[in-house]
Structure formats: structure tokens, C-alpha cells
Amino acid sequence: MTDTSSPTLPSAADGQGQQPAIRILAQFVRDLSFENPRAPESLRGGASAPQIELGVELNAQGKDGGVFEVELKLTASARRDGEAVFQIELVYAGLFQIVGVDQEDLEQVLMIECPRYLFPFARRLIADLSAEGGFPPLMLEPMDFAAIYLARKAQAEGVQAGNA
């Protein structure tokens, strides 16, 4: 289901009856921000370890020709003694051509499989950025995008049930 190396993937126009395939057409940084508001004081040794908060958002939208844009937004904020130490915000995106996937499975592919491809690159950018900011590299743990998808879906269904 995750063949990304085949140079002869069929076009999305012939979509029916094909083997499921995901092809990465492009990856790019849409937005990147690093704030170090208390520098240089925040860089002095001997201070206690900061509290790190992480956030993850996923978005996908269709384009022409069976191409989809998927965004992975990662935020990391570090606080020490109630004050901001650093803040990182990264929106890393990719263009994916998806063929041979049933319509009812497409959302899961876009929100689980595509972010799995993007994450290692976004993780490296965050580690490099925090290191360049004067801190130890912030190495994000691997993420379970299936669990994130299921939790967000359950949350959305709960909100809809509450409004009914």
C-alpha cells in the first residue's frame, strides 16, 4: 500500500481496479518559526529542565488529478518556572498522488499513512532548529498517527452527538 518508488505508477485518472499506491510528489516547509524570548539568559547552564508541551494537527485537501496536499503541523513549547524558554512551530506539507484506494479508505490514508512519510523529515527539522537555538536537540518520539486519527474522529463524533 505504500509503494513510493515505482516510476511507472498509473495515473489517478484510471483509478479503478489498481493496486493501492501512494506516490510522494513533493515535500516542503510551509511555515517555520522559532522563538527564544529569554535568550541569552535561557541558555545559561545549571537551570532546571524545561517542561515541554507538544501539539499535532493534521490537515488534508484534494487537488486536481488525484493529488492531495497533506499538512503536518507540529508545535513545541518549553517553559521553565512558568516562563517561556522557546517556542517552535512547523507546518510541513507534502503533495501525494494516491491511486487504487477506495473512497471510504481515503481519509485514513491521508490522515495516517501520509503523515507517517512526512514525520521523519519534520522531526529532523525540529531537532536541528532547537539545537541551532542553543538548546539540546529536541528529539520527538515516533507518533502513532492511527491513534491520533481515531482519537480526533471519536472527539468529532462526540461533539456531533452532543449537538444532536
Image: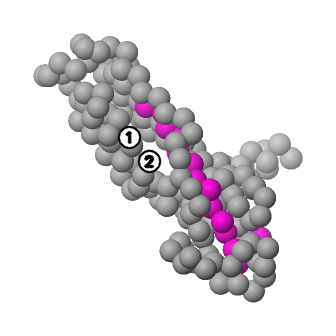
Tell me where residue 150 sits by quadrant. Answer: bottom right
Q: Is residue 117 left or right of residue 71?
A: left
In percent of width and height, residue 158 lies at 72, 49
The disc at residue 122 is 2
| Image point (86%, 47%), residue name | 164
In the picture, the disc for residue 126 is 1
Looking at the rendered structure, the kind of residue marked 1 is Ile
On the rendered structure, is 107 left or right of 150?
A: right
Range of the magenta residues?
Answer: 88-103
Say which quarter of the image contains residue 22: bottom right
Q: Which amino acid type is shown beneath numbered disc 2?
A: Ala
Residue ID at (79%, 73%) = 13
Along the viewing direction, whichever of 18 and 58 lies nearer the viewer? 18
Q: Which residue is drawn at 44% across and 47% down?
A: 122
- Residue nearer the viewer, 100 or 153: 100
Q: Can residue 111 be seen by looking at this rendering? A: no
The secondary element bearing badge 1 is classed as helix
Magenta: main secondary structure equals strand
117 over 50 or under it: above or below: below
Query: CB atoms at circles 1 and 2 under 8 Å apart?
Result: yes
Rendering coords of residue 5 (x, y %) = 50, 74
CA neighbours of label 1 inside 10 A, class few (<14), some (14 to 19), many (20+): many
Please say whether residue 23 is visible from this viewpoint: yes
User: What colouring method underlies this structural image?
Assistant: one colour
Left or right of 50? Residue 122 is right
**Farthest residue, direction left:** 46
Give the secondary structure at mark 2.
Answer: helix
Answer whether residue 72 is magenta in the image.
no
Q: Is residue 95 magenta?
A: yes
| Percent x, y of residue 58 | 60, 48
Seen from this angle, which residue lies furthest right? 164
